[in-house]
Amino acid sequence: MSDYAERRARMVEHQLRGRGIRDERVLAAMGEVPREAFLPEHRRDQAYVDAALPIGSEQTISQPWIVAAILQALELRGDEEVLEVGTGSGYSTCLLGRLAAHVISVERHAGLARAAAEHLRAREATNVELMVGDGSRGVPDRAPFDAIAVHAAAPAPPPALARQLAEGGRLVVPVVTGPEEMLTVLHRRGAELETTAIAPCRFVPLIGAEGF
Ligand code: SAH
């Protein structure tokens, strides 16, 4: 086993399973996708630390546990159409591609989207589609989505995204509640949205029409 593979396996056991991640598909995907491949060369050695890491353009790749918490809350079974807001490095995009049928991922920084596209090509992720722009508005002409993941903190759950949820669909979004943020999941049940708080967290801000 390579050094990275060993560190990845330890990350899954200690940082994820040891801290309450129970979805076996999420654990398996995070045991397979190499986080190091989505980092700038000089940061690869830190790939399995229990933290977010800088990826350029003042943005970060999220801490492995928070990525797992988002993926688990999306309750993916494999046949879903997913929207992701905040491609960043492309790491979470790659994982979503493994866990769902198809992913549209939107990133506002063209440079990050370009690097993510290269990383995803190298991983042969063929069921993911990248777009550059303001993802806080969603992608109305491709809606509805069974699951929507937002990787940047919003002042409130973006109404445009909630409107693009299919019946029974899940929207996971970090919402600013004070000095911290709360990772929040909204379930569409008919006209109602059922809201559940998952865990406190820290994210970069969602910049856009329904962000800051
Ligand atoms: N999921 C990423 C984490 C990215 S951090 C990963 O695994 O690496 C959040 C990202 O959201 C940043 O790259 C930031 O540029 C992007 N972002 C912020 N506001 C956005 C918006 N309105 N639309 C699309 N992307 C946005």
Image: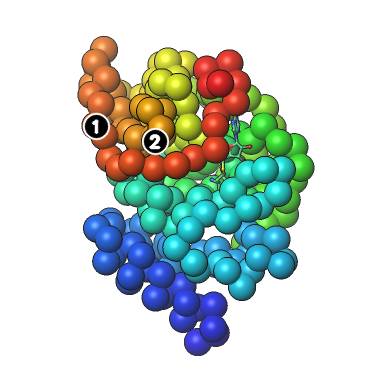
Residue nearer the viewer, 77 or 105: 105
Question: From the viewer's perspective, is the residue at label 2 or at label 1 nearer?
Answer: 2
In terms of image quarters, where does ligand 1 lie? top right
Residue 180 is situated, as x and y percent measured from the top left of the image, at 39, 35
Q: Secondary structure at mark 2?
A: loop
Please tell me which of labels 2 and 1 falls first in the chain.
Answer: 2
Mark 2 to mark 1 CA distance (whole Å)? 16 Å
Mark 1 residue type: Thr
Residue 44 is situated, as x and y percent measured from the top left of the image, at 64, 69
Q: Residue furthest top?
A: 191
Mark 1 C-beta to ligand 1 under 8 Å: no
Residue 50 is situated, as x and y percent measured from the top left of the image, at 44, 63
Answer with left or right where residue 94 lies relative to residue 180. Answer: right
* 170 shown above or below 97: above
Q: Residues within 10 Å of mark 2 (few under 14, many from 20)?
A: some
Residue 34 is situated, as x and y percent measured from the top left of the image, at 55, 67
On the rendered image, what quadrant is the C terminus found in?
top right
Q: Residue at x 41, y 70 (%)?
A: 11
Q: Count of labels shown?
A: 2
Tag shown at residue 160 = none
Q: Residue at x 33, y 41 (%)?
A: 200
Q: Residue furthest front?
A: 179
Residue annotated with mark 1: 196
* 143 shown above or below 74: above
Q: Secondary structure at mark 1?
A: strand
Residue nearer the viewer, 52 or 40: 52
Q: Residue at x 75, y 37 (%)?
A: 110
Is residue 119 visible to us here? yes
Q: Residues within 10 Å of mark 1 (few under 14, many from 20)?
A: some
Is residue 77 visible to us here? no
Residue annotated with mark 2: 180
